[in-house]
Image (cartoon, grey):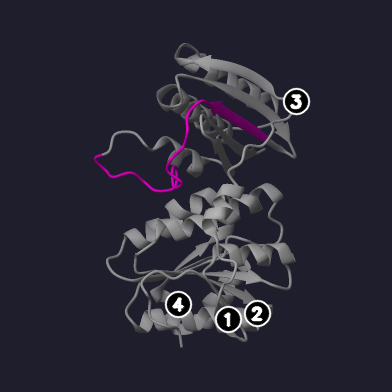
Amino acid sequence: MVDALSPFRHPALLYHGDGEYLDGVVPFLLEGLDRGHPVAVAVPGRNLLLVEKALGSRVGEVRLIDLHEAGRNPGAILPTVLLSFAGEHVGPVRIVVEPVWPGRTAAEYSACVLHEALINTAFAGRAVSVLCPYDTAALAPEVLADAGRTHPELWNAAGRTASPHYDPDRVRADLTRPLESPAAAVEREFDVGQLATLRGFTEIWAARHGLRRPRRDDFALAIAELTTNSVLYGGGTGVLRLWAEDAQVVGEVTDDGTITEPLAGRVPPAAATLGGRGLLLVNRLADLVRTYWVPGRTTTRVHFRC
């Protein structure tokens, strides 16, 4: 049986094959239902079908979410899946979420690892249990090692142990170091006077590189949000870079601001708060968002598939 919440738990389930997957996930869900806790499952489509079938008559009591759709951008999983579901309920909740699956690109995978580290910050002290399955047959050893760095507990067919390498703060530091943009990128410096024309320029550039509507409009809106943030909070000026790679367009905005809140863009601000929603919107729009910062410099990079 699954232990009681204490109050926040974030175990990684290291499974091999469908049998071990269901043996780890289904009892976790059923005990939550028996305790009267709201329960959700957000996993890739094939595994969602496995769980749906295994739950039988109780499937109607569980929120089912295909993470191939809802989690294409790992940065959107916290606000749109986990925090959204937990925020609907008072008291303990249980969620199974599987953000890492075979086929993720290297850039997506890095964002997944950061997401897993930030779960610990987002739910610290709350009566929330988030179980994250990892396929040991299909994922590389370094992926499984990262699971031990971002999860305080490791579950497998042999039992449950505390992770000896758990260190989410180090993970966050490792994954928020600046990356170089390609030399071929189109570059535009801007201040408040260029914001209006910059949005039109971005849309025309994206059209020339194969991004169709409505995603072209989303890309231009995301860039507009980032450049506006630079003007308002990043020192008043910034640099926009645009390039195309691997059937996607990429936009990057750098300014002189410093992000001090690790959950920026992932936790919705209070309803009465003015502002603070730009990065949240960008995470909802883009296929991938990556943010890097050092004191006095922040870069946010967005990817949109063509």
Q: Is mark 4 on a helix, strand or loop?
A: helix
Is 100 placed above or below 110 here? below
Q: Is residue 114 visible?
A: no
Residue 279: give x, y in percent of width and height.
45, 38
Residue 88 at x, y = what percent? 31, 61
Q: Label 4 near label 2: C-beta < 8 Å?
A: no
Residue nearest the viewer, comparing 126 with 222: 126
Residues at badges 2 and 1 in contact (C-beta under 8 Å)?
yes
Numbered disc 3: secondary structure: loop
Amino acid on which disc 3 is placed: Ala
Return the residue at label 4: 59
Q: How far apart are marks 1 and 4 (CA)?
A: 14 Å
Mark in front: 3 vs 1: 3
* Lower position in the chain sequence, tag 3 or tag 1: 1
Q: From the image, state whether disc 3 or disc 4 is nearer to you.
A: 3
Asked whether residue 303 is drawn in magenta, I would say: no
Q: Give how far apart the Cα atoms at labels 2 and 1 are.
A: 6 Å
Callout 1 crowding tier (Cα within 10 Å): few <14, some 14–19, many ≥20: some
Name which residue type carries label 4: Val
Q: Which image quadrant is residue 4 in?
A: bottom left
**What's the residue at 57%, 42% (across, down)?**
289
Amino acid at the residue labelled 1: Leu
Q: Mark 2 points at which residue?
A: 18
Is residue 250 shown in magenta? Answer: yes
Would residue 201 be found to the left or right of residue 30 on screen? right
Residue assigned mark 3: 183
Q: Magenta stretch? A: 249-272
Question: For the residues carrying marks 2 and 4, which lies nearer the camera in this image?
Answer: 2
Mark 3 crowdedness (10 Å alpha carbons): few <14, some 14-19, many ≥20: few
22 up-or-down from 67: above or below = below
The residue to which callout 1 is attached is: 22
